[in-house]
Structure formats: C-alpha cells, structure tokens
C-alpha cells in the first residue's frame, strides 16, 4: 500500500496540504516549457527540507556572529568550493536569495548613486533588474542601453555599444539576458569595457547550467570580471542566487560586504546546503550530457517550427530557449497562445519581442525552452512530439484540438516521470 504523502501536513494543515498535492500533480501531469524552470533532484529536495532551516548564520564561514556554526560552515564552504570549480572562479558568494538579489548586491558593491550601467535593451532580451523603470534601481543608478543590430540574426550592435560606452562612460558593462536565444561575443564586451574603464559583468542566470556543463562558452574565459546568476534555472539547484568573481580579491571583498551586512540578514542555510548538492551534481560527467541535450532538444523544436513557417526571433536558437512571434506566425497574441497551451497542459510564457507591434502587457511573443523536459529524460524525438502538439493547438484553437493535445501531453508526462519522489510518489 502506498504511504500517505506529507503525513504531518495532512493532519495539521489540510489547506496547505491540498495546495501542495495539487502543485505536485500539476508538475507531474503537465509539460513545463518555461525556460527559467526546472525540476530539482531528490537529494536537493532533501537538503531543502533539512534542519538547517532552523539556524542563524549571519556572516561568512569562520566569521559568524552567532555560535553553533560547525555544520553551517561546512556546507557553505562546500558550496563555495564547488561553485568556484564549476565556473573557474576565484571567489564565490552563495548567499544571495535570488538572481535579482544577486544583481542588486553587485550594483551596490560596484557603484555609487548616479553611476551608469550599460545594459541590454529589455525588449531585446534583457532582464527587469537590468534597469527597467518599474524597479527602484532606476531611482539610484543610471541605465543606458544597447540592442540587436539585426533581429533576424540576433547580432548585437557592438559598434553602437562602443559609441555609447565612450559617450556615457559606464562603471559597469552588463551582458546577459532572459529572452535571447543566441551566444554573445564575449571578447567584444570585454574589449569595450577595458577601453572605457568599466567592469565587465555577465548575468548568466539563464545559462549557468549550460556553462557549467560546457555546452556554451564561459564568459570568464574571455576576461569578464564578475558573473551573477540564479541557481534554479538551467543549473537545476534550489531557488537562489550567487555572485562569482574571476580573480580580483578587491571586487570579491566588496561583493561580500554588499550581500552581508549591506543588504541581507541571516543566510538561508538549508538553501545553501541544497546549492552545494546541486553544484556537486553539476560537477558530474552526466551533467555535461544534460547540458548538451538541452541545446539539441531546443534545436529540434526550432526545426519543427521552422518547417511550419513560424517566425522565431533571430531565426532559431543556439541555447535552451526559443522566442516565437505568435502574432505573425499564428495570428494570435502571446497571451492567447499561452492560455490555449495552458489548457492542454503545456506551460510557457508570453513575452515581448523586439520592435513589438503589440502592447507590453499583451505582447506578440511566446518564450519556451527545454531545460525542464530534458531533466525528465526527453530527447529529440520526444520534443518534436511536443512541438507538433503545440502547433496542433495553436492552429486548431478549438476545444477538440486542446483535448487531443492534452491526451498527448499526459502520455508523454507519464513516460517521463519527474526525478524527485517528493513529487511523483
Ligand atoms: C531570472 C533572472 C534574474 C532574476 O532571478 P530571480 O531569482 O527571479 O530573482 C536575473 N537576471 C536574469 C538574466 C534572469 O533571467
């Protein structure tokens, strides 16, 4: 007989229990295509549920404010050592609570109020924390932008970037993105940063796992000074952030001070333990296969959409994600496409595209990717089926098309269980 799931929660708090088993079933039965999501392993889940959630550990290993730090020091030191090895970094701060927190701490470490950051145009793939007017960061720092020269190829306009950099003299040149399907010319970024005396920072939040697995280039190999990241996207760890410094002890010290006591209080030690576990997993040879399979799968999906004549921004993908113009390709908005696919059990998100003809709250694009499906063991043949189901829904658009796709989705989900038994048991 199967044991009761969450035996204590069932008795103590049935309302939360119901929400949790609901989410478990949603993740188990549907297909996750949001490119910033993934499924953690059973081992990562166990670390997240550990007693370390009870412990205060303000400070850093060997330099804590409170006592009783034997085991917190052990896990944080493991996380730091493994992170450094994974990315070829001289220093790592594993305490940021998320990717946004990592970026905020990085800005406060390196900038004074009023200083300038040169970052990627948000509608071309940049992130909110790279200077969107809705963030409070723009009340403190000055953000200027570079973008793509050619939306059909995705090439960044490096000459324009150099011209603007010379003009505004940024303290930071920021590379990195949330919705850009190509690799950047890292050497160019560093060259321009050196020319104007800026610090070169890459936000690898989306592609950290691809870098760790050796499937794409490592910006540190091209001289980037700092990398910020999340740990829960392609890197497949718990929700969280991290800041890596290539070699400057001075920069690393500023970053440590900025994270704590500058911005955060006690670090979430259960989460840092889970980061250590995830980094250990990413150091295994099998993670290389995982990272390269993510890209193979994304390319296989892009080919299906290309055959269909759909318009993809930059014409396809070289990483884990695809940005598709649903408006031009299927005559519906990104939001309508998202809602239709949701009903079929396929989860993705609407997204602004460069030079969008629709409004930001109701954009033309959809963004989707393969990190989560690849964790479930999907290979090219499987994702081709997923892409075909998506096209059936987006062209059919009636209840019948949705219901038929939903059956296909359930069959694929059943064939590929989620790794952690926290979910599938
Ligand atoms: C996701 C993301 C972030 C923010 O991470 P959170 O953990 O959601 O705070 C920052 N930068 C980029 C490029 C991202 O894709």
Image: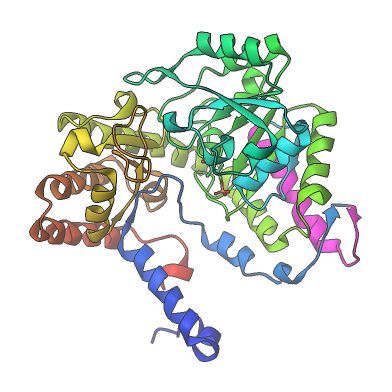
Could you tell me residue 68's position as x and y percent?
A: 88, 67
Residue at point 60%, 45% (across, down): 99
Q: Looking at the image, which is closer to me, 220 or 71?
A: 220
Q: Quadrant of residue 274?
A: bottom right
Residue at point 62%, 18% (across, down): 222
Q: Is residue 303 above or below residue 285?
A: above
Q: How many marks?
A: 0
The C terminus appears in which quarter of the rendering?
bottom left
Q: Is residue 40 above or below residue 16?
A: above
Indicate yes or no whether the magenta region holds residue 63. yes
Q: Is residue 387 visible?
A: yes
Q: Quadrant of residue 73?
A: bottom right
Residue at point 84%, 30% (across, down): 249
Indicate yes or no whether the magenta region holds residue 183. no
Tell me: 87 left or right of 11: right
Could you tell me residue 51's position as x and y percent?
A: 71, 72
Tell me: 351 left or right of 242: left
| View extreme (front): residue | 139
Ligand 1, by image quadrant, is top right
**Which colour scheme appears in the figure?**
rainbow
Q: Is residue 423 above or below residue 304?
A: below
Could you tell me residue 61's position as x and y percent?
A: 85, 52
Q: Looking at the image, which is closer to me, 363 or 54?
A: 363
Q: Is residue 84 visible?
A: no
Residue at point 48%, 32% (across, down): 122
Q: Quadrant of residue 173?
A: top right
Q: What kind of secondary structure does the magenta stretch mostly adopt?
A: helix
The N terminus appears in which quarter of the rendering?
bottom left
Could you tell me residue 183's position as x and y percent?
A: 46, 24
> Over which residues does the magenta segment extend?
62-87
């Amino acid at each position: 007989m199967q044991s009761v799931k969450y035996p204590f929660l069932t008795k103590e708090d049935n309302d939360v229990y119901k929400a949790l088993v609901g989410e478990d079933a949603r993740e188990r039965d549907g297909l996750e295509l949001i490119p910033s999501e993934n499924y953690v392993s059973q081992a990562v889940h166990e670390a997240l549920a550990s007693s370390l959630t009870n412990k205060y550990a303000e400070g850093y290993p060997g330099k804590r404010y409170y006592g009783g730090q034997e085991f917190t020091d052990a896990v944080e030191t493991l996380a730091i050592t493994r992170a450094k090895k994974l990315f070829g970094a001289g220093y790592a701060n594993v305490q940021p609570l998320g990717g946004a927190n990592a970026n905020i701490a990085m800005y406060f470490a390196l900038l004074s109020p009023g200083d300038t950051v040169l970052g990627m145009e948000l509608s071309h793939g940049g992130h909110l924390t790279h200077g969107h007017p809705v963030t409070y960061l723009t009340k403190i720092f000055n953000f200027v932008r570079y973008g793509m020269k050619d939306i059909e190829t995705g090439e960044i306009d490096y000459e324009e970037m150099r011209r603007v950099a010379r003009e505004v003299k940024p303290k930071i040149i920021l590379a990195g993105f949330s919705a850009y399907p190509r690799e950047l010319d890292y050497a160019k970024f560093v060259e321009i940063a050196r020319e104007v005396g800026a610090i070169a920072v890459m936000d690898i939040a989306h592609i950290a796992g691809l870098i760790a697995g050796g499937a794409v280039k490592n910006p540190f190999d091209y001289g980037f000074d700092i990398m910020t990241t999340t740990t829960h996207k392609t890197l497949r760890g718990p929700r969280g952030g991290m800041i890596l410094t290539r070699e400057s002890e001075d920069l690393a010290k500023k970053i440590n001070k900025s994270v704590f006591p500058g911005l955060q209080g006690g670090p979430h030690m259960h989460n840092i333990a889970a980061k250590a576990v995830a980094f250990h997993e990413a150091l295994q040879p099998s993670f290389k296969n995982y990272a390269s399979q993510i890209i193979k799968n994304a390319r296989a999906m892009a080919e299906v959409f290309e055959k269909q004549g759909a318009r993809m921004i930059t014409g396809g993908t070289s990483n884990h994600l695809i940005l598709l113009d649903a408006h031009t390709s299927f005559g519906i908005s990104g939001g309508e496409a998202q809602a239709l696919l949701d009903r079929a059990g396929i989860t993705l998100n609407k997204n602004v595209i460069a030079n969008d003809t629709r409004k930001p709250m109701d954009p033309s694009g959809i963004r989707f990717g393969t990190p989560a499906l690849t964790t479930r063991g999907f290979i090219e043949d499987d994702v081709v089926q997923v892409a075909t189901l998506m096209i059936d829904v987006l062209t059919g658009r009636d209840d019948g098309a949705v219901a038929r796709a939903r059956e296909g989705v359930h069959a694929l989900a059943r064939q590929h269980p989620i790794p952690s038994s926290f979910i599938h048991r």
